């Protein structure tokens, strides 16, 4: 039920200013479907609903240790063959692997079942620590709340940072966590890390992205040594201060590129890069395209 709630929340209605999705749940046999909460869901659509879907997300199910029926595997393969995006949340990846869609590809699943996944499907390059893995038209995500990360990544990839950030704000989540970030964290949301001093410093950094923000300054504001700060930061967020700042700067640059007509030089200054050239280098390295190309693809300004 958690997975159903996640996809419903992300792809459900969020107001007229955001894209609307023709969202539906489907199953092999329409009708009442049992859930882990003991409350059945009545599913109206069968596998024929996949015939026109642009995006298919396989959700986790209790019987994942047994391969799905051939009709389900055939429907997933057919959706992929005709060009749909196919994704899986948590142990839903077992279904994609059983359909042969993950052979030779990288994939992830819930860390608790990654060993079983690798044993069952040796042709899949399993990355048990990743939050999600994007292989183009096939994506897999980790378990539980990491489903939000997968869905928000899909929104960001297809519609840009502004849309993904708006939905993230609606559901009170961080707008972006890199797919390579560790699954199992002491406190996976940097904005609410459970450490008052550290949380205050992160909030201050967000408000001062135009500054250089060296780790020494962040540690000083947290009243810690650099070594202690780096250790506690990584324990709380699953990433390093440098990687967190880089992700934050790029995410902020994306939103400014989409929602403003500011020159790239000014955007670079506002997010803390010394020049447009530095921003361009980071953008190409991390996003695959230069800032101006990104703006042409996702801009929302007239």
Image (cartoon, grey):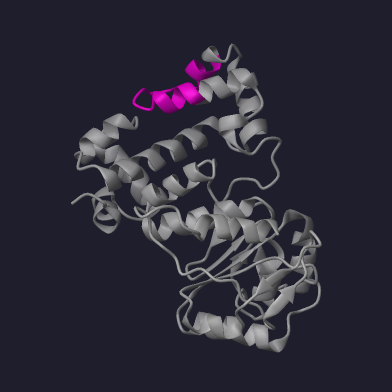
Residue at 78 percent of width and 55 percent of height: 112
Q: Is residue 224 above or below residue 25?
A: above
| Nearer-the-camera pick, 82 or 55 | 55
Residue at 63 percent of width and 57 percent of height: 5
| Nearer-the-camera pick, 247 or 37 | 37
Q: Quadrant of the N terminus?
A: bottom right
The image quarter containing residue 275 is top left
Residue at 46 percent of width and 40 percent of height: 247
- Asked if the magenta segment contains residue 86, the reply would be no
Residue 123 in view (yes/no):
no
Image coords of residue 77 (percent x, y): 58, 83
Q: How many marks?
A: 0
Residue at 74 percent of width and 67 percent of height: 118
First to last magenta residue range? 203-219
The image quarter containing residue 227 is top right
Image coords of residue 9 (percent x, y): 55, 55
Residue 262 in view (yes/no):
yes
Image coords of residue 81 (percent x, y): 50, 84
| Nearer-the-camera pick, 183 or 1 | 1
Q: Is residue 138 above or below residue 245?
A: below
Is 269 situated left or right of 10 in this image? left
Image coords of residue 14 (percent x, y): 44, 53
The image quarter containing residue 67 is bottom right
């Amino acid at each position: 039920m958690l997975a159903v709630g996640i996809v419903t929340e992300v792809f459900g209605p969020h107001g007229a200013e955001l894209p609307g999705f023709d969202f539906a749940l489907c199953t092999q046999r329409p009708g009442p479907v049992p859930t882990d909460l003991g409350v059945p869901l009545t599913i109206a659509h069968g596998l024929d609903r996949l015939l026109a879907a642009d995006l298919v997300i396989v959700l986790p199910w209790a019987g994942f240790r047994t391969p799905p029926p051939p009709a389900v595997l055939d429907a997933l393969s057919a959706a992929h063959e005709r060009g749909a995006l196919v994704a899986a949340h948590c142990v839903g990846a077992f279904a994609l692997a059983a359909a042969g869609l993950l052979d030779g590809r990288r994939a992830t699943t819930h860390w608790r079942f990654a060993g079983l996944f690798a044993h069952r499907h040796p042709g899949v390059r399993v990355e048990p620590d990743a939050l999600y893995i994007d292989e183009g038209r096939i994506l897999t995500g980790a378990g539980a709340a990491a489903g939000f990360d997968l869905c928000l990544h899909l929104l960001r990839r297809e519609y840009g940072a502004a849309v993904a950030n708006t939905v993230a704000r609606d559901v009170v989540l961080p707008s972006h966590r890199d797919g390579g970030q560790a699954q199992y964290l002491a406190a996976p949301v940097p904005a609410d890390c459970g450490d008052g001093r550290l949380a205050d410093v992160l909030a201050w950094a967000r408000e001062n992205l135009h500054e250089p923000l060296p780790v020494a300054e962040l540690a000083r504001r947290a009243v810690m040594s650099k070594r202690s700060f780096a250790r506690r930061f990584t324990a709380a967020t699953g990433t390093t201060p440098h990687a967190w700042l880089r992700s934050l700067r790029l995410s902020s640059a994306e939103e400014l590129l989409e929602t403003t007509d500011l020159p790239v030089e000014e955007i670079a200054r506002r997010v803390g890069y010394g020049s447009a050239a530095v921003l361009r280098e980071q953008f190409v390295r991390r996003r695959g395209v230069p800032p101006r190309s990104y703006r042409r693809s996702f801009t929302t300004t007239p």
